[in-house]
Image: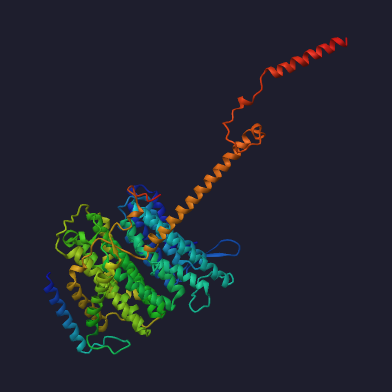
Amino acid sequence: MTKKTVYLLVAVVLVLAAAAEMAGVHMHAASWWPLPFGYDIFFGFVGAWVLIIVSKLIMAPILQRDKDYYDDEFDEDGRGDD
Amino acid sequence: MNELMLHPGLILWVVGIVAMLAPKAIRKYVLALGPLAAVGAALKLPLGAEYTMHFVRDIQLHLMYVDKLAWIFAFIFSVLALVSGIYAAHNPNRMEALCSMAYAGGAICVCLAKDWLSFIFFWESLAVTSLFLVWCNPTHEARRAGFRYMLVHMLGGGILLAGIFCIWYTGHGDLMIHSLTNRRLGWALGLGLLGRFINVAMPPVNAWLVDAYSNSTLTGGVFMSCLTTKVAVYALIRVYAGTELLMWGGVLMALYGACYAIMENDMRKLLAHHIISQTGFMVAGAGIGTAMSMNGATAHAFCDILFKSLLFMCAGAVIYATGIKHINKVGGMAKKLPLVAVCFFSAAFSIAGIPAFNGFISKNITVNAAAAAGQPMVFTLLELAATGTFLSIPLKMGYFIFLRKDDKGAEVINPLPINMKIAMSISGFLCFLYGVYPDLLYRHLPFEMTPYQPFTAPHLLQPVQMLGMAMIPFMMYLKNMEPHTAISLDTDWFYRKPFAGFIGKASALLCALCSGLGGAWQVLYEKFMDLTSNPMDFLDAKPFRKRSHYNPENYRTSIADPMMITLTVLVSSIAYFIATM
């Protein structure tokens, strides 16, 4: 499945979902601001984008280390420093 | 006595002991079929059933009391023991058979306990049995992870015990388990909560979970993924429901686990991060404290046990078959392990809350309960965490492990045993069944509330819009989403690096001090021995002069002296005798 096909499928599903919302489906019971049309579509995109940016482009460079970062706990036979 | 024979936890203990003692050929049947007795007993357990035994003085142990909340947890733990027992049936390790069943049995015993003494006893049994599930994996990493796990849980258990003593003291000897919400208990409330924060893996005391669970055996990990944290959720609902700190702590857990999971490459570590994330939904539900939110937390714990154990089974199956645990080193598994792929997507759609799978009918109760309780920020942040779940499990794991082109050369080198396939199929079916017939679960929810209708147009449209749109950023950042082999530093860094370094330096200092004092003591000892070993030399009154080694021959008198004395006395005596005659 190519990227183009995925985008197309997502577009079809979202158009149908948006049409249902336009047809009068009331989406949310509570919020602290009036939710506009397509709020969940917007939130899904922005939420996923923010999570990817925060995790992969901010947290990963700060927090990720080489896979043997903790290996100085072990010597060659794995018995540690004792 | 009849009530006690129906105790599913004790039945599982018996199953574990029999499995340990049984020969290998019989053990697999005991593991696979024994827990059926526990499921049957759980189904037969009547509400209100009680068993009490005398302990010491006037203290009674309430080993079993069945209400709706305890029953639903006892039932799902029995089901977990059944499917996980089937999954582990090929494993010949006697110790693991005993510990896994005793672990599940202990979890049920905690839920059915009505007094704090029984509770803490079985609570600690969970820590011990799960520790040995880590140590059943014969690697040095598992041994080290087991020690870290033990230290963290000793701390948690100790804090909880201190909390129980406070409860006993402030309650004037009352050891029965009651809700502590809104009671002015000070230390008792704080210590009890902190002890449970450790077990529920709330940041910053969360790192033990990923560390230990990813180092357990493949079969043991399935048990571990569902028991300790869910028992802690049960305790939070039972005792601390409505505590606001829990609500925000749960939100933190949900987001924290989701972010770490997006970075992770190790399959079981990724899933372990999602244990924290999903448990966050339950903790938040307990913290909101309404009937709807607590039912949501209970329902989500029930469904999470089904789909999380299945995810661990599927990850374990891929690792078992290929010998590879990293996502970036496999691909195209849908063609090589089609049954695993089907079961994986059943669990992945469940955890993401996609309609017709069980996460949809449980997670949304808690999320909507937050909105209904006037907590729109909690609602929004939980929705964000749900998006993160969708990104890292169905999309990231699903695409990179199962769907992408097979260009990594990962081959199936160990065909899967039939028992693993049966266990995964049962769990996958249950995820689907509860997703399409939610009333099977809803009728057992413990708190009275307006019936929740999952299959309404807004409830169905919301995940379709939100999760459908979340696919776009995933595709946009597809290259970034492929993980690489690395360690993500977590809060265990503090005790694995600086604290371990401090302990190492402090130990070296104390060893040097000990060695120095020992040397000084040795000198004093030798001088003292030297001085007292030879009284003759001591009388020389020159204690610190250099002396040669003591040789008694140097101080022994000649034999001539006593002979001369003897002869003199003899001759004198004879002379005296003759003279007096």
User: From this viewpoint, is residue B310 visible?
Assistant: no
Residue B258's image quarter? bottom left
In the image: residue A74, left or right of residue B575: left
Towards the viewer: B300 or B264: B264
Q: Is residue B310 above or below residue B465?
A: above
- Image coords of residue A40 (percent x, y): 24, 82
Q: Would residue B523 appear left or right of B490 to someone viewing this image?
A: right
Q: Quadrant of the C terminus of chain B?
A: top right
Residue A47: where, in percent of width, then height?
25, 78
Residue B197 placed where, x, y %?
A: 42, 69
Depth order, front residue of B234/B212: B212
Task: Give the residue at x 42% y 77%.
Answer: B245
Closer to the camera in the image, B272 or B308? B272
**Exactly how many numbered labels are in the figure?**
0
- Display colour scheme: rainbow
- Residue for point 57% across, 65% down: B59
Q: Is residue A60 above or below residue B221?
A: below
Residue sitting at the far right: B581
* Quadrant assignment, res B349: bottom left
Q: Is residue B279 above or below residue B103?
A: below
> In x, y percent, where is residue A35?
27, 88
Is residue B472 visible to the viewer in this orientation of the structure? yes
| Along the line of sight, the residue nearer the viewer: B175 or A55 | A55
